[in-house]
Amino acid sequence: MNRLLSEERVLVSDMPGTTRDVVDSPLVWHRRRFRIVDTAGMRRAGRVGRGGPVEMVSVLGAKRAIKDADVVALIVDASSGSWTRMRR
């Protein structure tokens, strides 16, 4: 999001759990208006429950943003060596 907006709009960190809120910003690209949204990351459903109420609310906000979106870019951390598909 920071690169698309050419400004430091969202906090970036290698530490999991840094982003908790849904952050949206307007973007004008080739004279077209877009709304881009950055959400909290999501872990497997079983691990989210163990993460406590803050993580559960963060994931709920991310799921709502995904449901409302016309296009979604799923960013996966390939350095972890494993991933699972997201279920609706």
Image: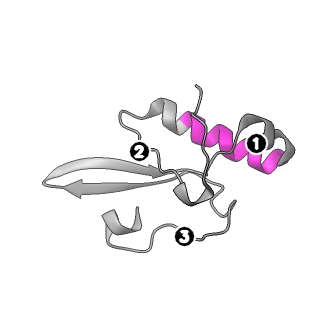
Q: Secondary structure at mark 3?
A: loop
Q: Amino acid at mark 2?
A: Ala
User: Which callout, 1 or 2, points at the residue further toward the start of the chain?
Assistant: 1
Q: How many marks?
A: 3
Location of residue 3 by image quarter: bottom left
Q: Residue at x 58, y 25 (%)?
A: 88
C-alpha separation, residue under disc 3 versus residue under disc 1: 21 Å
Q: Residue at x 45, y 68 (%)?
A: 9
Work out whether 19 lies above or below 14.
Answer: above
Q: Which mark is residue 75?
A: none
C-alpha separation, residue under disc 1 versus residue under disc 2: 21 Å
Measuring from the top left, give residue 81's x and y in whole percent: 60, 53
Q: For this rendering, which residue is in front, 64 or 83?
A: 83
To which residue does mark 1 refer?
Answer: 56
Q: Which residues are magenta?
A: 52-64
Mark 3 burial class by Cα count in 10 Å: few <14, some 14-19, many 20+: few
To which residue does mark 2 refer?
Answer: 73
Q: Is 47 situated left or right of 73 in this image?
A: right
To which residue does mark 3 refer?
Answer: 12
Measuring from the top left, give residue 32's x and y in whole percent: 18, 48
C-alpha separation, residue under disc 3 versus residue under disc 2: 17 Å
